Amino acid sequence: MTVLKPQVPFFGNIFLLGVGLIGGSLVLDLRERGAVGKVAGFDTNPGNLRRALDMGILDEAREMCPEALEDCDIIVLAIPVVALDSVLEKGFGADVLVTDVGSVKGSSVRAYGKAMEKGVKYSFVPAHPIAGDERSGPEAARRGLFEGARVIITPIGEAGRDVQTIRNMWETVGGKVHFMAPAEHDSVFSWVSHMPHMAAYAIIDSIYRENPELIGLSGGGLRDYTRIVASSPAMWAQIAVANREKLLEATRGLRGSVDRIIQTLERGDSEELERIFSLLAGVRKGV
């Protein structure tokens, strides 16, 4: 008896703007599964563009213009949030399906809304793969990055065929798709992603201000916790400002927790500290 393999969706021609870790890994996985035809793309860094061609992420380097998008099925925007919002507001000179990989959705949805008000026509399905590390650039791209990773899609309006297309794309590379409203997404990730980055920066800053030489005496705990400080400073500054309202709420929440520990230390109350630490250890083990 012949066993039929599950049919792999095919996405034809993709245009990739930004050839770093996330965008590059997405294309490599789609290629691995035979799910994409041709990939053209562009990056403002000429060195990144050359490496993406050498690595087989791109078939062709093209600037993003209406002529380059004529036969394009999907545009994937894998660029920093400020540039992303500018591109979305400007539009693409073609009625195409566009998605992104950014970790802030509110500002992107607003940029898309401005484009629609100006009569620009294209379809936008925001997405956010929860994957990656502190590395950047096409050389950081790798196959299997999204296997089992959560991918948040934040549809604008009704979830129609375009949303299903983007869902299929991420599920093809192993992603576990979840849906959220854009505002809910930004609130959730201000707490579980953006604020922890701010905390890691603050920890390194406090130690460095006390004595720069102390950093070199640290053990694995500090290195593990603050690994994310090695991420792109420009990218995280943009994310922080783009999501600043939600991030301020989360960062003030962090300050409240630190203040509680300070007050307990000031009282010298080891039993209360143990109670707090035990409770939080149990929470962490459940993650």
Image (cartoon, helix red, strand yellow):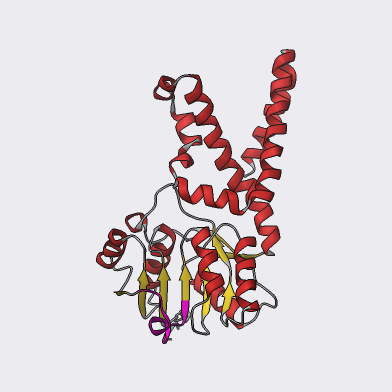
Any part of residue 175 in sight:
no
Q: Residue at x 28, y 59 (%)?
A: 47
Which residue is nearer to you in this view: 285 or 191? 191
The location of residue 140, given as percent across then percent down, is 36, 54
Residue located at (63% from left, 52% from top): 243
**Residue nearer the viewer, 171 or 6:** 171
Hey, which residue is sitting farthest left in the picture? 54
The residue lying furthest to the front in this view is 118
So how many labels did they put on this image? 0
User: Residue 171: where, in percent of width, then height?
Assistant: 52, 70
**Relative to 257, is 94 above or below?**
below
Residue 157 image position (x, y, % from top left): 70, 75
Query: Residue at point 44% right, 20% down?
Result: 214
Q: Quadrant of residue 128?
A: bottom right
Q: Percent from the top left, x then y, of residue 219?
A: 44, 25
Q: Quadrant of the N terminus?
A: bottom left
Which residue is rendered at x = 69% and y = 17% of the image? 265
Whether residue 69 appears in magenta in the rendering, the answer is: yes
Instruction: State the extent of the magenta-drawn residues as a range.
Output: 63-74
Residue 153 position (above or below residue 96): above
Considering depth in this image, is 132 or 74 the residue closer to the camera? 74
Q: Can you say whether 256 is above or below 72 in the image? A: above
